[in-house]
């Protein structure tokens, strides 16, 4: 009995060993490599654009016409510059906001500024018309009027920067024409006054001479004979 159990156990051990020998051990699968994190490039274009728009707004002092938008855009630009090269994703987000903000400042402030300069040019035109500059200095006046009309066309087309430039040039042109026309008018009036004064002096001299001759008892014949 004991021998039978021994041989049965031995047979089972042989079968188990054969089974283990025929089945190779499983090789552990390699863990997947972590995906490489792509670096966000520095937002150079966004930074340059934001600075360019800020310079344009500052050149015309447009921040005074859109103070809230300008302050927010400045804050976004500063945040973008601070994050630049450290967290480029955050820098780009801030700079995109700065670009949009300064664009809004230029649109809003530019419209107000152009309206103001247009009114100034129209006021200067009235001054020039009052002194008849269109006749006295017609070339200067015509050049200023052409610039004013160009400003109107540019404003209608939505080119506020050109409109403002044309209106400003027209204003200066009308001012110059008014000054020149006024100067010519004053010189003409002065010449007329001098002529009248000379004529009056001549008449007075003649009267004085006649009085002197009369007092001397010297007769004066008509025609000087």
Image (cartoon, rainbow, N blue to C red):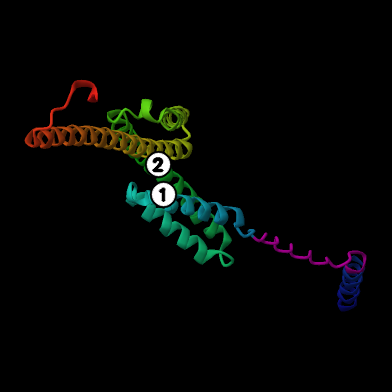
Q: Is residue 38 above or below residue 217?
A: below
Looking at the image, tell me whether mark 2 or mark 1 is earlier in sequence order.
1
Q: How crowded is mark 1: few (under 14 residues within 10 Å), some or many (20 or more)?
A: some
Name the chief secondary structure element in magenta: loop
Which residue in the structure is indicated by mark 2? Answer: 110
* Position of residue 124 measured from the top left corner of the image (x, y, whole percent): 32, 35
In the image, what residue occupies the spot 55% across and 56% down?
Answer: 47
For the N terminus, the quadrant is: bottom right
Residue stretch in magenta: 20-39
Which secondary structure lies at badge 2?
helix
Say whether residue 155 is left or right of residue 214: right
Q: Residues within 10 Å of mark 2 (few under 14, many from 20)?
A: many
* Position of residue 36 measured from the top left corner of the image (x, y, whole percent): 70, 62
Which residue in the structure is indicated by mark 1? Answer: 60
Q: In this view, does 200 lie above or below 223?
A: below
Look at the numbered discs 2 and 1 and tell me whether their residues touch, using CB distance below 8 Å: yes
């Amino acid at each position: 009995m004991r021998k039978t159990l021994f041989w049965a156990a031995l047979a089972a051990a042989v079968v188990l060993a054969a089974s283990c020998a025929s089945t190779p051990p499983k090789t552990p699968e390699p863990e997947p490599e972590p995906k490489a994190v792509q670096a966000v490039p520095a937002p150079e274009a966004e930074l340059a654009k934001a600075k360019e728009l800020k310079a344009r707004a500052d050149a015309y002092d447009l921040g005074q016409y859109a103070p809230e938008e300008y302050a927010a855009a400045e804050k976004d630009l500063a945040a973008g510059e601070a994050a630049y090269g450290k967290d480029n994703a955050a820098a780009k987000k801030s700079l995109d906001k700065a670009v949009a903000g300064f664009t809004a400042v230029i649109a809003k402030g530019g419209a107000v500024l152009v309206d103001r300069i247009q009114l100034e040019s129209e006021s200067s035109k009235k001054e020039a018309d009052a002194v008849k500059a269109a006749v006295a200095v017609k070339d200067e006046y015509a050049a200023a009027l052409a610039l004013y009309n160009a400003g109107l066309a540019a404003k209608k087309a939505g080119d506020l920067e050109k409109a403002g430039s044309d209106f400003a040039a027209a204003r200066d042109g009308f001012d110059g024409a008014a000054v020149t026309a006024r100067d010519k008018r004053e010189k003409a009036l002065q010449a007329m006054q001098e002529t009248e004064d000379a004529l009056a002096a001549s008449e007075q001299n003649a009267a004085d001479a006649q009085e002197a001759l009369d007092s001397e008892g010297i007769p004066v014949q008509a025609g000087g004979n």
